[in-house]
Amino acid sequence: MNRKARRSATRSLGLSAVATLLAGSVAAFGESAPPKQPYSTWRDFGGSVDTMQYSSLRQINKTNVNKLQSAWMHPVTGRGNFPFSPLIVDNFMYVIGDGPSVVALDATTGKQIWSHPVSATPTSRGFNYWESKDRSDRRIIFSVDSYLQEVNALTGVTIHTFGNDGMVNLREGLGRDVSNVGTVQSGSPGHVFENLIILGSAPGELYDSPPGDLRAYDVLTGKTVWTFHTVPHPGEFGYDTWPKDAWKYGGGDNTWSEFAIDAKRGIAYFPLGSPTYDLYGADRIGADLFGDCLLALDARTGKLIWYFQDVHHDLWDYDLVAGPKLLTIRQNGKRVDVVAQAGKSGFLYVLDRLTGKPIWPIEERPVPKSDVPGEQSWPTQPYPTKLPPFCVQTFGVDQIDPYLDDAEKARIRNILVTARNEGIFTPPVVGRTQIEVPGAFGCANWGSTAGDPATGMIYVRAWDGADTRVLEERQPVSQGGSPGQALYSQTCAVCHGPDRTNHLPAPAQVDHDVIKAIVRSGKGEMPPIAENALSAQDLDTIIAYLANPRASGARATQTAQPGQPPRPARPRPVMAPPPPGQTRYWGPYGNPFNASDGLPAAAPPWSELVAYDLNDGVIKWRAPLGSIPALASKGIKNTGSVRPRNGPVVTAGGLLFVGSNGDGYIHAFDKETGKILWETEIEGTPDGIPAVYEVGGREYVAFFAAGGTGDGIVVKKTKPEAEGYYVFALPSSDPKAKNKGH
């Protein structure tokens, strides 16, 4: 479809949508919005530009939350395999829809207002919203196939004046050949600050992945305003923490998840991931700034203000992933503005927001030394001295799951006593099992923390689980390999290994239907992958490669959705040979230490909510989050979910809303005590961050839930039609439901 036809198609859709809007109660173009109380809207990812995951609404509170009921449910098919957090502006709710598509729903009924089809899954955890001061220009911002795009928030029509005919290529400007990079966009949306859209990135975690540069673009034009090099270039601060010229080949150091902005001060706080390759660093000897750092940058210029590195020369994939929380706490009779950062390591770091200085001492302690050839592990790592960790950091024989039978306990005990197992910073080993606890999934992952600006409390959704891993000398994938080999390298090799040895059948045992069913529905630790994330043709190509690795094969061409620009040819990823004279090693990225039934080998609870009072620096309470269907059926409850990717929202009504994605329950906890005040089971498996909003004086709580997933052991079985957005409110007849929620 040519440019003129595309404009016509979107314009027709927009006129229909506008007619729907005019019949409703949406503010007209040019009408200024009334001032809102802080944290009373949900028009940004995480609820606000500081990603606090907090709502000041209090219509739903501890006295009436037990009356919550379903207000509406909007089903979705083909959504993909990542959770989503809705965005709400006025009475519009913006979500991912069928197709896939970017969709606007009526936030009070769930009825569709408009739909904008896209060629692949857009930014999968949330969108961004921007409006002009007079509200005459309102935009939804998202990325598809690493192209940043904008549509009119009221009509769904593409903003063609943005970038190049409505698109900005995020692969450009990285300062390196990215022909081997399948994607650059992050699943998380970034933030709008003034007239900037500020983004992290997700360029991959394999050898030769590019750095995850942080960038800001002009909202109106799409032009790059600033770039921060997360692997420093010559002359930049931190360059000497890498080998010479490492900026030409080093990668990672990316904000693939959340970040926060102090809008009053114009400071952006970015938690950065580990340098690549995650588990081996002999080709990046040094501290490797800015890997595993919390960065404070000037949001307008991208200039470095301060940094804090929580892991030096990372060998464990201990990214900083959870969103920083910007709180004000009481210290020595004074109010102090802090940034609190939860780590995959299980430590909570609390720093002065302006200087980066720790509120309580953080000391460097000696850690075990690596014996991998050529490796130079860092001799010390930072340990907070005041705040206790929020999860388990060791796994010994006395911590084996007591519900296992004797034979299984003996098997796990034998692994533990023969492995290298020296606690949180046990380095990887060649030819011998390493116990990593916390595992690479981490104690705190995406969306896992919520802050209460009124009290100085922070709530962490913690996960306890160990990994086992063995490093092996890496066999590089040939650049002349088949399309199936290239697709496998991009999609599967991180977990299953470049040589296909990690939990995959031998070629003669490959069953096309079995593998297809597992990929689409998920199994155990493996999440489902929908067709819009991995096409049927590409999946067939991968399976054919697994069945016959030596065959050349062919790959089908992917086409665009009607009304969309052609999809760019996906680059063929390769794992290029190491530099001359240098050996590299590889280990499976995530190899959880599980029992034979797929559940963690360690004793439950596996997932918990942990409440910190940062005024006193103590844990106030902790409570299990969720259950496992197979165990609950035997009367074993409160074990926590397995490897959750979701997060809580705290409210001024005294509540903490969160889903447990193993058993399909939504919960409301008392934020002061950790007691469950209300819960309900839904048909899907709740995931992502809830959204709390108010329209017409009625408060709502919205969740995304996946469908068509589960094996009945780790995650409950669900039907595809269970996937969608579930919204709850007090009964409309309740007098309190008619009052303002703040």
Image: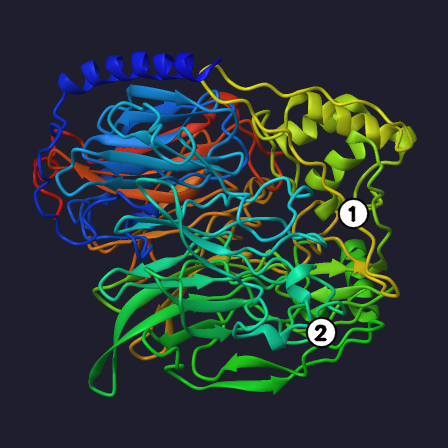
Residue 74: where, in percent of width, then height?
36, 24
Q: Position of residue 209 (x, y in %)?
A: 66, 52
**473 displayed left or right of 446:** right
Q: Which mark is residue 285?
A: 2
User: Is there CB contact under 8 Å for labels 1 and 2?
Assistant: no
Q: In this rendering, would 637 be left or right of 590? A: left
Q: Counting residues from the N terminus, which is met first, the one under dot 1 or under dot 2?
A: 2
> Where is 59 relative to 437, above or below?
above
Residue 687 location (% of width, % of height): 45, 41
Kind of element beneath mark 1: loop
Residue at the spot 76% in from the left edge and 59% down from the top edge:
469
Q: Which residue is mark 1?
A: 497
The secondary element bearing badge 2 is classed as loop
- Identify whether 494 is placed above or below 122: below
Discs 1/2, front: 2
Question: In the image shown, does 13 or 684 lie closer to the viewer?
Answer: 13
Q: Is residue 312 left or right of residue 724?
A: right
Q: Amino acid at mark 1?
A: Gly
Residue 606 placement: quadrant: bottom right
Separation of residues labelled 1 and 2 (CA atoms):
24 Å
Is the image coloured rainbow, by chain, by secondary structure, or in one colour?
Answer: rainbow
Q: Which image quadrant is residue 348 in?
A: bottom left
Figure label count? 2
Residue type at the position of mark 2: Ile
Can residue 276 be seen at all in this image of the molecule? no
Q: Residues within 10 Å of mark 1 (few under 14, many from 20)?
A: some
- Can you say whether 245 is above or below 695 in the image? below
In this rendering, would 586 be left or right of 423?
Answer: right
